[in-house]
Image (cartoon, grey):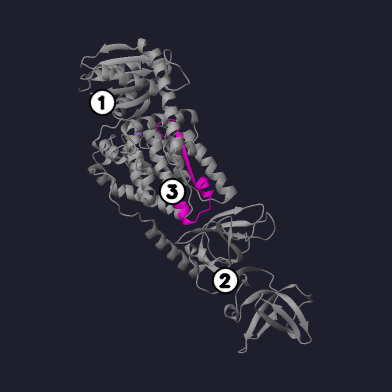
Amino acid sequence: MVDTTADTVVYRLGVNCDLEEVEEGKTYIGRVQGFAPFGAFVQLNDRVKGLVHKSNVKMQHRERDPIIVRVIQIRSNGNIDLEEVTPTVYHTQTVVKKMPAVRLSEIGKKIGRTVLIEGEVAQIKQTSGPTIFTIVDESGTENAAAFVEAGVRAYPEVQLGDIVGIVGEVMQRNNQLQIEVASLAVLEGKDAERVRARIDQALEERAEPPDLPFLIQSDVLERLKPEMRSVAQRIRKAVFTARPIVLRHHADADGICAAVAIETAVTALMRENGDDFDAEYFLFKRAPSKAPFYEIEDITRDLDFALKDHIRYGQKMPMILLMDNGSTEEDLPSMRVAQIYNLPVMVVDHHHPDEVVDQYLVAHVNPYHVGGDFGITTGMLGVEIARMVNPAVEARIRHLPAVAAVGDRSEAIERALYLAVAAPAYSEDDCRDIALALDYEQFWLRFSDGREIVKDILNLSGDAERHRRLVRLLADEANRAIEEQIEAVMPHVEARILPNGVRLFMLDVEIHAHRFTFPPPGKTSGEVHDRLVSRYPDEPVVTLGYGPDFVVLRSRGVMMNIPQMVRELRQEIVGGGVNGGGHLVVGSIKFVEGMRNDVIESLIRKIGKAPI
Ligand code: MN
């Protein structure tokens, strides 16, 4: 490895540089232009040339040969006296034209002109043609294309995160701005510090979310505001610095509404920021988690893609945002993996949080932190944060909290307030149909985000007629499937009355329900529960839907703490392999198949002691 601090620096005079960028005593690389009886003319670039007197020529040259020269003096008439030098060890550094740098947000006004831009390299992508450097400054993001030879990496010395100065012509290709690189220099020392400080400070300010009132009046939301702003600020900053965002969410209507609100705000902000069109796909990824937590399987896939994108496309490593999951102990293994790779993780959730997760998070919005509960759904939080990220999308997403509230059966006062926000365009029945359509479609989408289909279901694609027809069809299909399931399972529901007066209903969803189709076991249990609750309107009701190694709980009118029960069961039943969680009164528990009876009987005893 060559020690670049000790060897000679040979400067390459960049495009557009004039005499004023040439300094006496410095060494430059040029080309032999021609010969005269008294010496050789050397071009330092298209504009600047000097003379090497024959007494100072060291080697034989032909025209166009590269030559390294030192500037002896610059005469007052502008003539440059050079001497040939032959350093054995040296590295080159490009000199960038001293001119005022143009902000990236301004280059749209400079098409066809040659400009200097200064910024951070946020991505380096080698195409089959030029090398594309994505440059970020305090005002925006643009691509700069540098070409040496098709498919060959230009400026191999430039690394992700470097501060660079680029001189080039502003071009417009397929409606997108691009800078055609004429010369590119990695700034060093004070120059780099100056630019970095300027960008960092301006970015901090630019990332600060606007201060808006919420769509509704809510004490819980007010208390969550500082943390919500922190999440919005980090999302904005990620967009402005071309850091990829991976958004993982619970695969139900609430989780989808929350995540799609952020997706809408982020993709619109990217466009506004000058990102190219496909950035919306490779810099923002939304994916549902099948489990109600961030599984090892999820982080493994996310990390695998992130590392490949980092190596193949020179992308930064992503930030992870978990919505409608992420706040329980079950998320810890994945968070530990994220920590090893230095991926910042943020959580926006309304499941009962375990404090232990917070050490792994850079931000955590959860109504339980401020005396609220799961009635504040993630969809409500997601839409309010999305407005902070990008207020321009508000009109498109303002109905999503109502869909989330209805989908998650929120009983908080905020539910009615958000329904009022969605009205009159969307009635409560509309919201219920949309939520059901989302659940139904997500079941068939499995691990895909279904970005464009989901936009139609939520009426975000601009085709209201198609939205209406699609939701009608999906909701009808879902209802038909549910009715069929209910018809099959209801005769098998077993009833008991517990010591505390709770009406307990139990159903084996493994043998008495259709499997591997919609509705899945959790939804089936929920539908059964809803019917039983309306049959016994004034009594406490608990419904357990169980399979060989799991039980799903739904309750009404009972003071339960499911995460607490899970902890107790895990301690009490040795060899039960108990884990799980969820909300306080709605959740799921897993165990090993051979211990099912012990776990369920013990669970029933606990429910029988819970206060009404
Ligand atoms: Mn939820």
Q: Residues within 10 Å of mark 3 (few under 14, many from 20)?
A: many
Q: Which residue is mark 1?
A: 560
Residue located 46% across and 56% down the image: 273
Q: Amino acid at mark 2?
A: Val
Of residues 508 and 218, the one drawn nearer to the viewer in this rendering: 218
How far apart in space, not on screen, are marks 3 and 1 (Cα)? 38 Å
Q: Which residues are magenta?
A: 267-294
Look at mark 3 in the image and give the residue it sits on: 266
At 23% across and 23% down in the image, what residue appears?
558
Coordinates of residue 7 in the picture (x, y in percent): 62, 70
Disc 2 and disc 3: Cα gap in Å?
Answer: 34 Å
Residue 583 lies, with reference to residue 302, above or below; the image says: above
Residue at image point 36% right, 39% down: 400
Whether residue 400 is in magenta: the answer is: no
Where is 173 relative to 191, above or below? above
Query: Neighbour class for label 1 at 10 Å: few (<14), some, many (≥20)?
Result: many
Frontmost residue, 446 versus 8 = 446
Mark closest to the chain's N terminus, 2 or 3: 2
- In terms of depth relative to the viewer, which is nearer, 520 or 264? 264
Q: Amino acid at mark 1?
A: Met
Q: Which residue is mark 2?
A: 96
Provide the secondary structure element on which disc 1 rests.
loop
Report the disc number at residue 417.
none
Say if residue 91 shows up in the picture. yes
Q: Residue 449, can we see it? A: no
Query: Ligand 1 near label 3 (Cβ, under 8 Å)?
Result: no
Q: Nearer the viewer, mark 3 or mark 1?
A: 3
Label 2 packing within 10 angstroms: few (<14), some (14-19), many (20+): many
